[in-house]
Image (tube, rainbow, N blue to C red):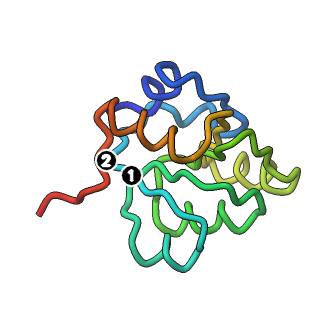
Amino acid sequence: MELERLVKSLGLDVRAGSDHLGQDVTGGYAGDLLSDVIAHSAAGNIWVTIQTHPNIVAVAGMKGLAAIVLAGGREPDPETLKKAEEEGIPLLTSLLPAFELVGRLYQAGVSGIVSC
């Protein structure tokens, strides 16, 4: 599913990386522990978190994630916005709590299960 379609259907706000919304989302991952995201997310995943610091952009870039979504009305730190823009990582925000946001992503067809 194309990232831009998810942004529109879920009413996500694009805070950085608007030029990179044409990529496909291969699945989803939700978590706030960076080491867990590094160990278990996959390239092309959309990542739901409440973390707002610049290290989330580094993790997303290292893993090749499609986007980061800050849930629960969280706003990214200014350094995070700058880093996301520089690295071309879509950084999105939502007022929805993480649990509800993940449910809506799942309903939209984003799976957390990797097919083998």
Horizontal and vertical percent position of residue 10 = 51, 25
- Residue drawn at x 60%, y 49% is 89
- Closest to the observer: 70 or 42? 70
Indicate left or right for 115 with 9 as reference.
left
Q: Quadrant of the N terminus?
A: top left
Q: Quadrant of the C terminus?
A: bottom left
- On screen, residue 10 above or below 90: above
User: Which amino acid, by three-letter code, is at mark 2?
Assistant: Thr
- On screen, residue 32 above or below 104: below
- Closest to the observer: 30 or 1? 30
Asked which secondary structure carries label 2, the reply is loop
Mark 2 or mark 1, which is nearer the start of the sequence?
A: 2
> In this figure, which residue is indicated by the disc labeled 1?
44
Q: Residue 3 falls in which quadrant of the image?
A: top left
> In this figure, which residue is indicated by the disc labeled 2?
26
Asked whether disc 1 touches disc 2, contact meaning CB atoms under 8 Å apart, the reply is yes
Furthest residue toward right: 78
